[in-house]
């Protein structure tokens, strides 16, 4: 089973550099995954950063595609089109993954063919001790707790079934055949001239998963979000 890690990006060379560094540090055998970066029209050093990783990490399959059509989901769809894997794992260009992140995804998705979607804890990257006011942004949930303002999610360390609506874009794993069956993502995060095409993005996809009773699980596939500007030890 091959896993395709798909990263859309736009003018975030520094953040992408850190994300790619965490990916080449994975403890997963290199032949089990490929890394696909879709550049949505960057004008900074994005291409140079990607080429550096391609040249310095010959044992990895790292693919670069340039597509200047605006929109995060445009990049995700291009990545899905180019993907060779049976499993698609969409991540953001500013997150870090734990060394065992992909091992967990591979183990769960290969042993449980009934699972269509998978996610894991999305945690903040703390650079200093978090202020107490941050606690007010978290909401308690039947599965654990969430902080929708920062796309953070912590449902504990157990592998368990959850609602599809809690598979969020920064740590979003789906079987390719399920992704195709559900018609992919609806337009979202697009430029002003295309706003009349605005859709419900990844939520639209997971709502269709609910309608079709597709199983969704959360497991110990950790990632941390630098959107929150914090640091945490995994």
Image (spheres, rainbow, N blue to C red):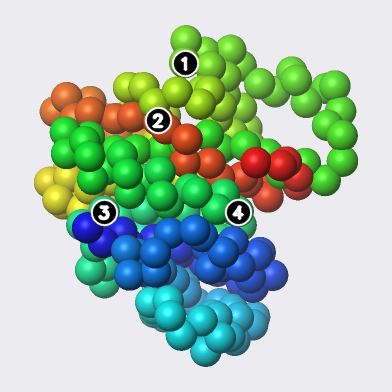
Coordinates of residue 2 in the picture (x, y in percent): 26, 61
Label 2: element kind: strand
- Quarter of the image where the N terminus is located: bottom left
Q: Can you tell which mark lies on residue 218? A: 2
Q: Which residue is mark 4?
A: 96
Up the image or down, 21 lies above or below 51; here it is above
Q: CA–CA distance between discs 3 and 1?
A: 25 Å
Q: Quadrant of residue 93?
A: bottom right
Residue at 23% in and 45% down: 110
Q: CA–CA distance between discs 1 and 4?
A: 23 Å
Label 4: element kind: strand
Of callouts 1 and 4, the N-terminal one:
4
Give yes or no for contact between labels 1 and 4 (Cβ–Cβ under 8 Å).
no
**Is residue 28 visible to us here?**
yes
Give yes or no for contact between labels 4 and 2 (Cβ–Cβ under 8 Å).
no
Residue 127 horizontal side relative to residue 64, left or right: right
Q: CA–CA distance between discs 4 and 2?
A: 18 Å
Number of marks present in the image shown: 4
Label 3: element kind: strand
Q: Which residue is mark 1?
A: 143
Q: CA–CA distance between discs 4 and 3?
A: 20 Å
Coordinates of residue 150 in the picture (x, y in percent): 63, 37
Give yes or no for contact between labels 1 and 2 (Cβ–Cβ under 8 Å).
yes
Q: Which residue is mark 3?
A: 87
Coordinates of residue 211 in the picture (x, y in percent): 17, 25
Between 100 and 198, the residue placed more toward the observer is: 100
């Amino acid at each position: 089973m091959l896993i395709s890690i798909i990263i859309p990006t736009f003018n975030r060379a520094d953040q992408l550099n850190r994300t790619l560094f965490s990916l080449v540090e994975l403890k997963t055998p290199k032949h089990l995954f490929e890394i696909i970066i879709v550049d949505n029209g960057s004008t900074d050093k994005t291409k140079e950063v990607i080429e550096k990783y391609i040249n310095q990490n010959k044992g990895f399959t790292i693919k670069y595609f340039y597509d200047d059509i605006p929109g995060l989901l445009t990049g995700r769809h291009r990545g899905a089109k180019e993907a060779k894997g049976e499993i698609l794992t969409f991540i953001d260009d500013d997150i870090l993954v734990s060394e065992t992140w992909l091992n967990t995804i591979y183990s769960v998705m290969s042993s449980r063919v009934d699972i269509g979607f998978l996610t894991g804890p999305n945690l903040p990257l703390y650079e200093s001790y978090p202020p107490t006011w941050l606690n007010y942004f978290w909401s308690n949930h039947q599965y654990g707790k969430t902080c929708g303002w920062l796309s953070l999610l912590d449902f504990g360390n157990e592998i368990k079934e959850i609602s599809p609506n809690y598979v969020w874009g920064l740590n979003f794993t789906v079987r390719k055949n399920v992704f195709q069956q559900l018609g992919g993502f609806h337009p979202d995060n697009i430029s002003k001239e295309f706003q009349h095409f605005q859709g419900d993005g990844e939520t639209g996809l997971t709502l269709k998963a609910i309608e079709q009773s597709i199983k969704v699980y959360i497991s110990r596939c950790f990632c941390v979000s630098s959107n929150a500007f914090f640091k945490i030890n995994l």
